[in-house]
Amino acid sequence: MDAIDRKLLNLMQARPDMSVIELSERVGLSHSPCWRRIKRLEADGVIRERAVLLNPVALGLTVNVFAHLKLRQHDESTLEAFESAARDRPEIVECFSMSGDSDYILRIVIGNIEDYEKFLKKVLLHLPGVASVNSSFALKCVKLTTNLPLSDGL
């Protein structure tokens, strides 16, 4: 990946709706080579997908919960079953396998505390292998970005 690829990716992160013509002008390429670079970056898995980012507050999803989960056992089938179940729940927007005290940390976006209590009782505690859940609630979002740092250095 060269400097033009990084510039292209930074532009696409900042303005995903930018046309290939505009992108090509900004990176100093003609349309066809720019389009080929984008297609190569997609084929190589560098560009995973394109998405529309919604405002959760405008949709009534005002609570971010960070749930630290511990599993009863750590065999392959339990881990795979848990991860599959977590991927199937739209409320769980992020799920990371962790080192340290928790086996997993989940970010859950939900309408209010009462909705989370129901989700905890009806869903989280019944996910495969879950032994315990320790929940923290975000007070304020200080920074949230989908942009990856692609600079050539500090």
Image: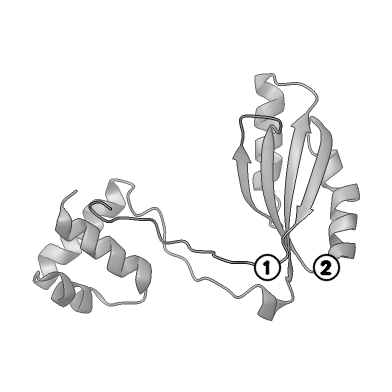
Left or right of 95: which side holds 111? right
SS state under label 1: loop
Q: Nearer the viewer, mark 2 or mark 1?
A: 1
Give the vertical position of 75 relative to 143 (above or below). Answer: above
Residue 6 versus residue 85: which sits nearer the camera?
6
Q: Could you tell me which residue is drawn at 73 percent across and 71 percent down?
A: 62
Residue 123 versus residue 64: which sits nearer the camera?
64
Sequence-wise first label, 2 or 1: 2
User: Around disc 1, counting alpha carbons within 10 Å, would you say few (fewer than 14), some (14 to 19), or many (20 or more)?
Assistant: few
Give the vertical position of 20 relative to 127 (above or below). Answer: below
Left or right of 14: which side holds 133? right
Q: Could you tell me which residue is drawn at 67 percent across and 80 percent down?
A: 58
Q: Position of residue 40 (x, y in %)?
A: 22, 52
Mark 1 belongs to which amino acid?
Lys
Answer with the quarter of the image where residue 100 lies. top right
Q: Position of residue 91 (x, y in %)?
A: 71, 57
Q: CA distance from mark 2 to mark 1?
A: 14 Å
Left or right of 47: which side holds 133? right
Answer with the quarter of the image where residue 38 lies. bottom left
Q: Could you tell me which residue is drawn at 41 percent across and 58 percent down?
A: 49
SS state under label 2: loop
Answer with the quarter of the image where residue 78 lies. top right
Tag on residue 140?
1
Tag on residue 112?
2
User: Around disc 2, counting alpha carbons within 10 Å, would you say few (fewer than 14), some (14 to 19), or many (20 or more)?
Assistant: some
